[in-house]
Amino acid sequence: MDWQQIFAARNERMKASEIRELLKLLEQPDIISFAGGIPDPDLFPAKAFQEAFSAALTPEMQATALQYSVSEGYGPLRDWIVGEMGRLGVPCTRDNILITSGSQQALDYLGKLMLSAGDTALVGWPTYLGALGAFNAYEPRYDRLDPETNRSAADYAEAAGDGRVKFAYMSVDFANPTGKTLDAAMRERVIDLADELDIAVIEDAAYQSLRYEGEALSPVLAREIVRKGDINACRTIYCGSFSKTLAPGLRVGWVCGAQEVISQLVLLKQAADLHSSTINQMAIATVAQAQFDSHVAKIKTAYRARRDAMLAALQTHMPDGVSWTRPEGGMFIWLELPTHLRSADLLAQSLRSERVAFVPGHAFFADGSGTNTMRLSFSRTDEAVIEEGIARLGRLIAAALEA
């Protein structure tokens, strides 16, 4: 049977995630992987989750834990998130929160909710690969979001052609893949631009808690509330996740935004999977209430040391002509190579000769550019292995420059 004649035309825009494919390399013990931006499982609060799941399965709680539940999410978890958002400067209520199966599901729902074929999504250049994967199914155009330029709203609107600009997507803290943080002035500029274009802002805050140095900056949503007084008058939609702080395998994230948006997302949730796993939400709520801050402090200490080790190793081993970012938090460092080098070619060579994995940068560009860039993650690897892996990469790149 020719399945291609049955698949929808939009299926042609769907591509396998290069990162998901590279994660398969973790099964090979001799590979040093700087590829997947995944937490270190040795740092998971496993004992706390064992206790939380046991508590959820007591006779008093199991009927709730194992039963269907409301699409909006488990009430005590939403209440905890309301408190956490308040600490970030976002006063809200349960009605402003939807629990999703990771923030990736939130991006899919937001793309489905807002994008018609030919509409424009403003994204970073580069931007999170998973966001492009989520939005691609809804057949958008992409345009470069760069608040540091003086590009006008009229210019963005003109470039959208027959469609219209629907939203600006960004990760403002320690962005995946670059590790960069958007400063306060640029966050304000994004709000101005969104008001001028009458579009939504999707604020992906997956790494917001993982700051290792520097002054914490309030989210874009918090800044918009200062201007407009009420979250329900705001156009920014905040996507949070427990994947980088507590446990990615439980797939628990959330959306915080205006009630009008949340109510529409609830309808999509009901159509897609009814609700996120109740028992997983209960376990996350229990662990978050008991030790979120202390656990985040623990993992920040570990990841800070690994970031510092990678930055030091890059300084020691990278040849002239290679530059990289110096993130204040998160899990990533972004390398830019001389323009004639292709990181995809280097990856193939590296896997053969050096046994080091990374993500070629072109995967993060909506237009496939950035062929001379690469993303390195330091979260999964200890300091000694980081030193060895970067030394190998430096040797490989130096040889490519001499060739």
Image (cartoon, grey):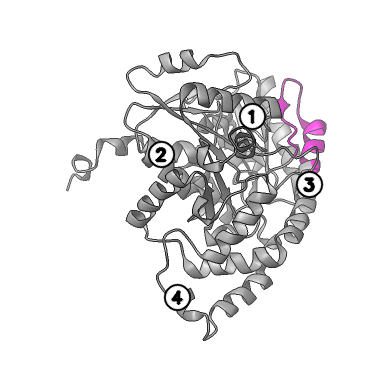
Judged from this view, the residue extending furthest toward the left is 1
Label whose residue precedes the other's in the sequence (3 or 1): 1
Foreground tag (4 vs 1): 1
Q: Which amino acid is tagged 3?
A: Arg
Callout 3 crowding tier (Cα within 10 Å): few <14, some 14–19, many ≥20: many
Label whose residue precedes the other's in the sequence (1 or 2): 2
Q: Which amino acid is tagged 2?
A: Gly
Label whose residue precedes the other's in the sequence (4 or 2): 4
> What is the CA distance from the residue labelled 3 to the residue labelled 4?
38 Å
Q: Quadrant of residue 148?
A: top right
Q: Quadrant of residue 142?
A: top left
Residue bearing mark 3: 304
261 or 384: nearer the viewer: 261
Foreground tag (3 vs 1): 1
Q: Eyeballing the image, is 84 above or below 176?
A: below
Q: Name the element at disc 2.
A: helix
User: What is the number of the mark on residue 66?
Assistant: 4
Q: Eyeballing the image, is 290 above or below 233?
A: below
Q: Which amino acid is tagged 4?
A: Leu
> What is the CA distance from the residue labelled 4 to the residue labelled 1?
42 Å
> What is the CA distance from the residue labelled 3 to the residue labelled 2?
34 Å
Q: Quadrant of residue 121?
A: top left
Is 362 left or right of 332, judged from the image as shown? left
Residue bearing mark 1: 187
Label whose residue precedes the other's in the sequence (3 or 4): 4
